[in-house]
Amino acid sequence: MKKLITPLLIALPLLMSAQQTVDERVEEILGRMTIEDKIGQLNQMDGRRDIEKVKQEVREGTLGSIMNIVDPAVTDELQRIAVEESPSGIPILFARDVVHGFNTVLPIPLGMAASWDDALIETTARNTAIEATEKGIRWAFAPMMDIARDARWGRIAESFGEDTYMAGRLAVAVVKGYQGESLTDPMSMAACAKHFVGYGDAEGGRDYNTTSIPPRTLRDVYLPPFKACVDAGCASIMTSFNDNDGLPSTGNRWLLTELLRDQWRFKGLVVSDWGSVAGLIPHGVARDKRDAAQQCIVAGCDMDMSSRSYLLHMKDLIEKGEVDVAVLDAAVRRVLKLKVELGLFDNPYARKVEKSEIYSDSVLDAACRLAEESVVMLKNESVLPLGENVRRILVAGPMADAPYDQMGTWALDGDKKHTVTPIMALRELCGDKVEIEYIPALTHPRDKSTAEFKALAKAARKADVVLAFVGEEQMMSGEAHSLSSLDLQGAQRQMLEELAAVGTPLVTVFMAGRPMTIAPQVEISDAILYAWHPGTMGGKALANIIFGHVNPSGKLPVTFPRNVGQIPIYYNHKHTSHRAKGTEGNLDNIPREAPQSVMGHTSSYLDVAPSPLFHFGYGLSYTTFEVSDLVIENKEVTADGNIKVSVMLKNTGSREGTEVVQLYTGRKTASVTQPLKELKDFKRVTLAAGESCKVEFEVPVSRLAFHNRDMVPAVEPGNYTLTVGTDSQSGLRTYFQIMN
Ligand code: NOJ
C-alpha cells in the first residue's frame, strides 16, 4: 500500500458506508496492499524486546500482531505508529496468553473444570476479557482444550481434563465469555482454541513429544472440542507443537484445510504455536525456514508466531511460484477480517476506562465463587466443616501461605500482592474466636528440612484440628514442566506422617496443577480437600469451605491414579476382550511356582488394583443426595431425535448443597469397539435440606455419533445403556434403542 493512502485509512470509517459488509471492507483494504504489506500482516512477534526495535518494525509494516505488551500507553503508541506511519496503515492486533483470569487469577482450567459450571466459567471469562481489554489485549490464546489423560504432562493444568464432551462444553463457555455478544465490543477479545490437535497425548507425558493417535480416536476423542468451538464462532485456532503419526500439525494440510476449512467451514484465523512453523526443521520434515514457510502456508497456517519464516521467505516463494498469491491473499484476508471484526480499523486504541474493573469487588467475588466450586472434597471422616467446638487450630505446610504458587501456571498478569492465601483468609474469618497457630514447617513444597517437625508435633497435640496445606509449586506444572513422579515432593509426606501420628484430626488440603499420587496421604488424613491451583481468591474459598460457609460441590474432571504406573487411566476406556477385574494388586498374595494361569487372564497389573484412587466425576459434599426414579421418555429414538430423560434428586442430608447430576451412555455392540461409557450431559442442581426436584435432560441423539467402520461419523442403530448418577461409577441404569 502506498504511504499516501494513510490519511485515507484514518478516514476509513467515514468513507465506508454503514452497509459495507466485513468481507467487502476486507477486500477494499486487501486491494490496496503491496506484497510486503501482506507478508507483514502474517508475522507475529513477541513485544518483550527492545521497544525501539519493535516500533521500527511496526513503522516498516513487518508486524501484523504483537504479543505480550500489557501497557496501554505502549500499545497505543505502537498503534499510532501503525496507523499513521506504517506503509499500510493497518492497526496491530495485540495478543496475550490469557488462560485463567488476567489480573484476577482464576483457578487453573483443570480446577475450573472441577466446578462443572459452564455458566460461571462464562461469567468469569467475561470478567477476564474486561480486565484484559482494559490493558489493550484483544486476542487471547485460550481456551486450551487438549484432552489430557496423563498427569505427568505439565500442561494438564491448562486443560479441562480427560473428557471430550466436557472439554468442548467448557471451552465454548470461555469462547462466549471472551468474545461476548460481539467482537466489536471494546470489552471483547478474540478467543483462540488450542492446540490443534492431539498435543495432550504427548508420549510419556513429556511435553512437545510425538503423538500416535489413530484416525478414529483423533476424530472421536480429540477433535470434537475444537468442532464445538468452531460452531460457537471461535475467532481463531492455534496449531499444536506435536507431530501426529509423522505430520507436525502446523504443516498438516489435511488438518488445517481439508478438515478445518473445507469440512467444518471454519472462517477464522489459524496461528502457529510459538516457532512451530520453523519447528518443522527440528521435526525433520523441512530443510530450512523457507521450506517450512512454504509447507505451512500451503497447509493453511495463516500467521507465523515468532519464527519469522514467512517474513523472511514468503516474497521469494511467491516470486518463484512456489506459493500461489491466492494462498497468501487467503491468509491475509483472515487476519484483516479479524481486525475488522474487532473494530480495530474504527478505533485501534485501548478502550478508555472510567472505572477500572481490575481486581474490582465483583470480579474478585466471581473468582472466589469459581474457586469454591472447583474444590473437590475427596474424603471426610466427620471432621469438616469445622464447628463451634473448634477453638484451636494448627495451620501447617508450605502451601498455607504461597501467594505466588497458588496462582498456578500461566498467571502472567496476576500480582501475588492480591492473592488471598489460606492463612490470611483463616485469620480473617476466625478473628479472635479461634486461636490459630501457624507453623509452615517447610518453606516451599520441595523443602527437605525436617527441623521444625518436633515443634509441629507439639503444636498438633495442643490443637483441636490440624489443617495441613501441601502440594506443588507453580513451577511444577505448565509448559515444559512435566514430571515422572507425582508424589508429594520434599519432606511433605513425612510432615503429614508426623502430624497424623499425633492423632489430632488431620485435614489435608492439596494445591497442585495436576492429580498427584496421594494414596498414602488419603489413608492417614481424616479429610482431604483438593483445591488445584485456585488463583487469587483460593485462600478465601478454602476458608469458606473449611468452616462450612460454603458446601463443597466440585467433582473430578480427571481420574486420579493410584500410582504413576497406572497412567494412562481414564473412565471412558474401551471395552477389551479381557476386562480388568479380580486382581487385588497385592504381590504378597501371588503363589510361588504355580501355573501361569492361576492369576487369570485380565487386563490388570499384578501389583496394583485395576481401579483408580478416585474416579472421574467423584466428589463429596457436606450433605448427601439420592437419585431415584430414572425415567426415559422415549425408549426408542431415531438418529435425528432427542433422548428425554428425568430423575428425581433428593437432598437427603441436613444442609443445603449442590450436586452435579451426570448422564452417561454406552453401547456394548457396535461396528467398532466402544468406550464403556461416555459423558453426554450434566447439570448442577442446588437443593435445600430435604428438598427434592426433578432433573430433566434432553440429549440430541447426534451427540452419540462416532466414526464407524467406514470412518464415517454416524449414529449407529442398536441398544444403548444410559446411566444417571453423581459420578462416573455409580447411578441408575436403563436402556434405550436407536432405531434405523
Ligand atoms: C507456546 C504455548 O504452547 C502456547 O499455548 C502459547 O499460547 C504460546 N506459546 C504463546 O505464548
Image (spheres, grey):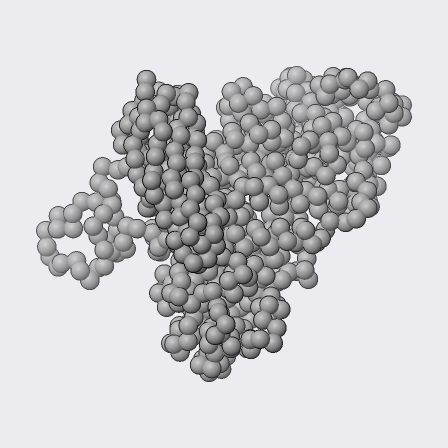
Picture coordinates of residue 693 (x, y %)?
43, 43
Residue drawn at point x = 79 percent, y = 28 percent: 345
* Front residue of this view, candidates 197 and 182: 182
- Front residue (pair 373, 252): 373
Image quadrant in which the C terminus is located:
top left
Quadrant where the N terminus is found in the figure: top right
Q: Is residue 206 at least partly visible in the picture?
A: no
483 is higher (above) or lower (below) than 346: below
Residue 633 occupies quadrant: top left
Residue at 61% over, 52% down: 367
Can you tell which quarter of the image residue 415 is in?
bottom right
Residue 225 visible (yes or no): yes
Say which residue appears at 56% left-offset and 59% top-offset.
541
Q: Nearer the viewer, residue 426 or 9?
A: 426
**Left or right of residue 279: residue 361:** right
Residue 381 pos. (x, y %): 38, 65
Where residue 566 appears, as percent x and y from the top left, is: 34, 51
Q: Is residue 524 above or below residue 289?
A: below
**Which of the two residues, 409 or 652, is positioned nearer the viewer here?**
652
Name the quadrant containing residue 238. Answer: top right
Give above or below for 98 relative to 269: below
Query: Residue 547: where, in percent of width, then height?
Result: 52, 65
Does residue 386 appear left or right of residue 141 in this picture?
left
Residue at 79% in and 48% down: 355
